[in-house]
Amino acid sequence: MKTETPSRHDATMHDSPLTIGGRAFQSRLMVGTGKYPDNAAMLRAIEASGAEIVTVAVRRVDLDRSKDSSVLHHLDPKRFFLLANTAGCYTATDAVRYARLGREAGFNDFVKLEVIGDEETLLPEVQGLLEAAKILVKEDFKVLAYTNEDLVTALRLEDAGCSAVMPLASPIGSGLGLLNPFSVRTIKRRLQVPVVVDAGVGTASDACVTMEQGVDGILMNTAIAAAQDPVAMARAMRLAVEAGRAAFLAGRMPRREVAFPSSPTEGMLD
Amino acid sequence: MNAKVDVVINGERRSVPPGVTLLELLAELALDPRAVVVEHNRQIVRRPALGDVRVAPGDAIELVHFVGGG
């Protein structure tokens, strides 16, 4: 049904879906599945976030305990798009190995590629990242590359055939928010492939400000999982991502260094 | 007789019957072949081939699945 006046939902309703590697997604919020107090809380938080893309890690099966660590017992792969990561890998060789195992365990050719270079900051090792990206693209993976906020690295990742480039807002699990909006904006402006900010948001305002930069999406885990109420925070993040995206599409007013009255200056009493 | 052979599964040394297939190994470990990915000496072995691959002494086998992660 067409209405004459735009409804208040139009900004998001008229947004195009986020398309990565030929697949369209309605939600611009992607969430991780790590660090939740329990699986029930994880599932409820993911539902509250509205996310379609959900990241998972590849790890050894626990041989001795019958502990139910498999995330697939809780997440229906028909309902969520499971994105395997290569978290914990410090070399291109390891990351490629984990990516191949993830593809075999999973349901798609997508991989969130991480090659870490430093234990304290978990900042990416960009040479290994590029090397792994090239190998995986050749093997027909859709590579979503976690990187720092360096434009040149982002450009090289795009050249290497990555399906999305994922600069960090701040270090993984830090909750420091978007430290370098200028660099993230520059990356978004210069790349053709989707730019999804991955890691570092701490609360809803961080997510909102990040989306206001015009990026295509956000991936987060700790900000939701480590909140006092993960389900409530997941909802806050959903709203923040929608609000930030809507504000970006709306186009903000110019910044001014001086005040400008909102009420008429004429018609004042003598 | 019935000597067992040593292999390394998920980093742990384990004794298994000689000539056991990967599929039989999973059964022995009570693991559902649909729920794990098997890497045998750094090569991924797909589900349909699990019954064809026999383990040899010193083989390195990794059994992995998806866990929570970001």
Image (cartoon, coloured by chain):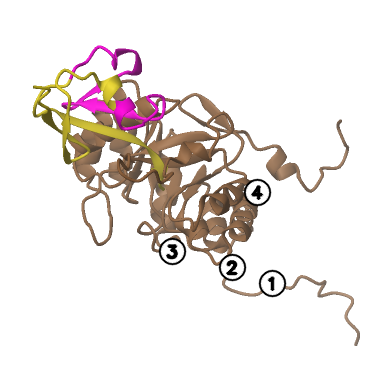
In whole angstroms, how far apart are the C-alphas of marks 2 and 4?
22 Å
Q: Is residue A1 left or right of residue A127?
A: right
In whole angstroms, how far apart are the C-alphas of marks 3 and 4?
23 Å
**Which span of residues is magenta-colored?**
B26-54
The answer as to whether the residues below labels 2 and 3 share one chain is yes
Q: Mark 1 or 3, which is nearer the eye?
A: 3
For label 3, the residue is A175
The shade of chain A is brown
For label 4, the residue is A246
For label 2, the residue is A256
In whole angstroms, how far apart are the C-alphas of marks 2 and 3?
30 Å
- Among the two numbered marks 2 and 3 on one chain, the one whose residue lies closer to the N terminus: 3
Q: Residue at x 53, y 47 (%)?
A: A214
- Amino acid marked by disc 4: Ala
Helix, strand or loop under label 1? loop
Whether the magenta-drawn stretch holds residue B51 is answered as yes
